[in-house]
Amino acid sequence: MKQSKHLNDLIDALSTLPGIGKKSAQRMAYKLMRTSTEKTLNLSKKLSNVTSMVGNCKICGIYLDNDDVLQQKDNQNCHLCISENRDISKICVTESPADVYTIDSSTDYKGYYFVLDGNLSPLDGRGPTEIGIKRLEHRLEQGNIDELILATSTTIEGEATSHYVQQLSTKYDIKISRIAFGIPLNGELGYLDSDTISHAFRERKEL
């Protein structure tokens, strides 16, 4: 059966989103077709605004509206990077700006951040250069860092990225730590998977 090329193009585009398969993309596309033209055009406008009006802080990498970017010596610095109330000797390395927002709102961490462009994934063509390792190394070369906190995920790619950054950082005289993963608060062992329990045992600490 012949189908609309433009509709199929939309389905293909939607299916590139994380966690969205072909069937889910198809349902989303058909839903958009049944949505009012005004709402669909509004969505299109928001997507366009994201690509043209949102950038990254040149220091830490979080997302910023271009109108809010501060120009300082040709660098784009955000409110986190210019804050005088933060510990300049600590850097927390994450995979995504979303992780920065989560950590900053959920903890009392008052150091600085560095956002990688994802994690290492040779199968997807993402090596050290693609995820911004050179930018991180430039930060470390400045010599004012005492501790590097690795806050990457526990996926295979996240663990590989953490290991790579750890090995890279050994030539600098800094403390390297990794955030702990394991038993969640109010969690019951009987409901947890073996990998989580195993990781919790490996990361146990003395009381």
Image: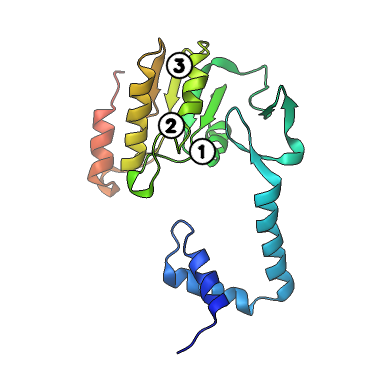
The residue at 40%/14% (across/down) is 175
**What is the x, y in percent for residue 136?**
48, 25
Coloring applied to the structure: rainbow
Local crowd size for mark 3, using a 10 Å CA cut-off: few (<14), some (14–19), many (≥20)? some
Instruction: Relative to 83, say whether 199 is above or below.
Output: below
Q: Residue furthest right?
A: 67
Out of 105 and 48, give the one closest to the viewer: 48
Within-10-Å neighbours for mark 1: few <14, some 14–19, many 20+: some
Is 44 drawn above or below residue 89 in the view shown? below
Point out which mark residue 147 bears.
3
Q: Quadrant of the N terminus?
A: bottom left
Disc 3 is placed on an element classified as strand
Few, some or many residues within 10 Å of mark 2 (<14, 14–19, 20+): many
- Across and down, in percent, residue 22 comes to 43, 70
- Residue at 65% in and 17% down: 85
Q: CA distance from mark 3 to mark 1?
A: 19 Å
Q: Which residue is mark 2?
A: 151
Residue toward you, 68 or 189? 68
In the image, taking residue 37 as reference, residue 195 lies left or right, namely left
Q: Which mark is residue 107?
A: none
Q: Which residue is mark 1?
A: 99
N-terminal label among 2 and 1: 1
Picture quadrant where residue 81 is located:
top right
